[in-house]
Amino acid sequence: MKHLFRTILLAATATTCLDGPSLAQSTGEALTGKECSACHLAFQAYFLPKRSWSAIMGDLSNHYGEDASLDAATAKAIEAYLLAGAADRDGRNPRWLQEIPADVVPMRITELPWFIHEHRKKAARYIKANPAIGTISNCVACHKDAARGYYDDD
């Protein structure tokens, strides 16, 4: 599982590079960056399946305890972008999703089995020693290029 995360990133990057972004994807990416990054890292779409992104976007008025409501057009563009890049886009079933039953809707990247496996010991110690980090979802505290989709820490 050590290189599973790298496999996730390479698969997502290769798809984006080969297919090239459409105008709608570029607009959705820009809006996602603008709106989501106003409060937290705009997580890359390939971390969650479509069912998760639909659930998250479907309840923005209660977005993890905050009201992140958006106008309908912006929400629709962001959701379309997230669904187009989701881990299970185009019927894909990557290894890291196979551990999650199809009827389960994961709502946090930090609760996915691969994330827990990769972060449970080292990250917990690092966060405890550095309280300014706050939470395990503060990816940029350890992965300086997280906003660009690069999380390798080797």
Image (cartoon, rainbow, N blue to C red):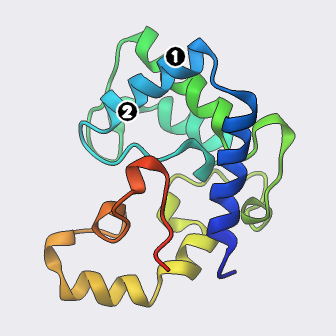
Q: Are marks 2 and 1 in contact (CB under 8 Å)?
A: no
Left or right: residue 35 compared with residue 28? left
Residue 75 image offset from top left, x and y in percent? 45, 19
Question: Tag on residue 7?
Answer: none
Residue 13 at what x, y percent from top left? Answer: 65, 46
- Closer-to-camera residue (139/113): 139
Rendered location of residue 30, percent (x, y) = 41, 24
- Residue found at x 76% / y 68%: 99
Determine the residue located farthest toward the left in the rendered image. 132
Q: Nearer the viewer, residue 64 or 131?
A: 131
Indicate the amino acid at tag 2. Gly
Q: Secondary structure at mark 2?
A: helix
Q: Earlier in the sequence, mark 2 or mark 1?
A: 2
Q: Nearer the viewer, residue 105 or 152?
A: 152
Q: Amino acid at mark 1?
A: Lys
In this rendering, the answer to whether 4 lies above or below 22 is below
Report helix, strand or loop for mark 1. Answer: helix
Q: Which residue is mark 2?
A: 33
Task: State the image quarter where residue 52 is shown.
Answer: top right
